[in-house]
Image (cartoon, coloured by chain):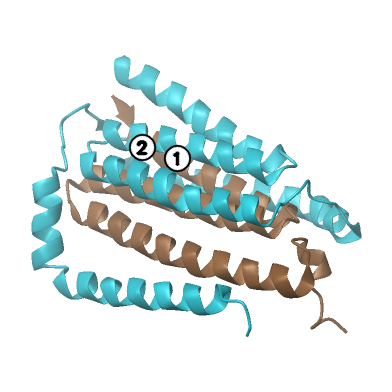
């Protein structure tokens, strides 16, 4: 019998590592991957709560999150390609035209 | 006992993969460790009785989305990331902030007695037919709206990635 809280703590740890990667990474593709990691962590807590409440709606929500993540990945990677074409860099610190 | 063993092995794999994503310099190594995280999460979903979710985790996430990532990394010939002055500033303030965040979440979870109910292996199985029943009855409208979303995303991706004439 593994308590639900173990899964939720694991989800929190993964989410926090995702936040950390989002803050520390400088490569725009890796930043994007850390967003995916955060979405995955949230999915884990959805499934854990679905198990806790014996309710399948959590699984349906995970399905929706995955659909949105797929759409977001397609659009985001297209934006990354467009940025790379104009700025010729993947470093977010060098994409600074809006900075004073 | 088996449940504990499987949980800890795959939780360790997931956390290790996530940390490797954070530590690696090359985006390809980060992408491969993210695939490891997703694979171990799929097994954790199976432990929680979410068969359908585990299957689409492998097919959609580890399959489709990560292949897209690896394609883009190779297409753009992404090399090792370079660190600038701003990243040191983020390191100094980011690490304590992140530690506080995880501490707060764990504190909130630990103080809820409801969260300590154990999960019996196989006590609750989310069958594909059950998920489909919900998806095509209660959640029919959101389901149809997501199909529109996907369509718009496809068109947006094509328009954005197209070379300017």
Residue visible at 46% across and 55% down? A39
Which quadrant of the figure contains the N terminus of chain A?
Answer: top left
Which of A69/A59 is in front? A69
Disc 2/disc 1 C-alpha distance (Å): 6 Å
Residue B116 percent location from the top left of the image: 33, 35
Residue visible at 35% across and 71% down? B150
Whether residue B161 sits left or right of residue B26 in the image: it is left
Q: Is residue B39 visible?
A: yes
Q: Which of the chains bears the disc numbered 2?
A: B
Residue visible at 68% across and 57% down? B76
Which quadrant of the figure contains the C terminus of chain A?
Answer: bottom right
Disc 1 target residue = B38
Whether residue B122 sits left or right of residue B17 in the image: it is left
> SS at mark 1?
helix
Q: Which chain is cyan?
A: B
Disc 2 target residue = B42
Q: Is residue A19 visible?
A: no
Whether residue B23 sits left or right of residue B11 in the image: it is right
Residue A70 percent location from the top left of the image: 41, 60
For this orientation, the residue located farthest to the top is B1
- What shade has chain A been given? brown
Q: Does B108 appear above or below A96?
A: above
Q: Does B162 appear above or below B33?
A: below
Which of A74/A37 is in front? A74
Q: Are marks 2 and 1 in contact (CB under 8 Å)?
A: yes
Residue B78 percent location from the top left of the image: 72, 52
Looking at the rendering, which quadrant does residue B155 occupy?
bottom left
- Mark 2: few/some/many CA within 10 Å (<14, 14-19, 20+): many
> SS at mark 2?
helix
Q: Does B23 appear above or below B7?
A: below
Looking at the rendering, which quadrant does residue A2 occupy?
top left
- Mark 1: few/some/many CA within 10 Å (<14, 14-19, 20+): many
């Amino acid at each position: 019998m593994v308590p639900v809280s173990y899964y939720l703590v694991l989800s929190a740890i993964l989410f926090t590592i995702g936040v950390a990667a989002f803050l520390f990474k400088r490569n725009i593709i890796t930043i994007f991957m850390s967003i995916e990691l955060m979405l995955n962590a949230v999915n884990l807590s959805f499934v854990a709560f679905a198990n806790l409440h014996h309710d399948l709606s959590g699984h349906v929500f995970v399905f929706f999150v995955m659909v949105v993540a797929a759409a977001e990945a397609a659009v985001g990677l297209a934006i990354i390609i467009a940025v790379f074409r104009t700025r010729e860099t993947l470093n977010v610190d060098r994409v600074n035209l809006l900075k004073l | 006992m088996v449940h504990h063993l499987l949980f800890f092995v795959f939780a360790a794999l997931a956390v290790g993969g996530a940390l490797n994503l954070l530590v690696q310099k090359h985006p390809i190594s980060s992408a491969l460790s993210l695939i490891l995280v997703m694979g171990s999460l799929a097994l954790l979903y199976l432990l929680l009785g979410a068969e359908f979710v585990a299957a689409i985790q492998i097919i959609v996430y580890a399959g489709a989305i990560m292949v897209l990532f690896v394609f883009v990394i190779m297409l753009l010939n992404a090399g090792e990331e370079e660190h600038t002055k701003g990243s040191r500033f983020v390191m100094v303030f980011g690490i304590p902030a992140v530690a506080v965040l995880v501490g707060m979440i764990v504190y909130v979870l630990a103080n809820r007695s409801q969260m300590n109910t154990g999960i019996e292996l196989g006590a609750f199985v989310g069958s594909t037919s059950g998920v489909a029943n919900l998806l095509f009855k209660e959640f029919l409208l959101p389901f149809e709206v997501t199909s529109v979303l996907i369509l718009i995303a496809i068109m947006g991706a094509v328009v954005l990635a197209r070379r300017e004439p």
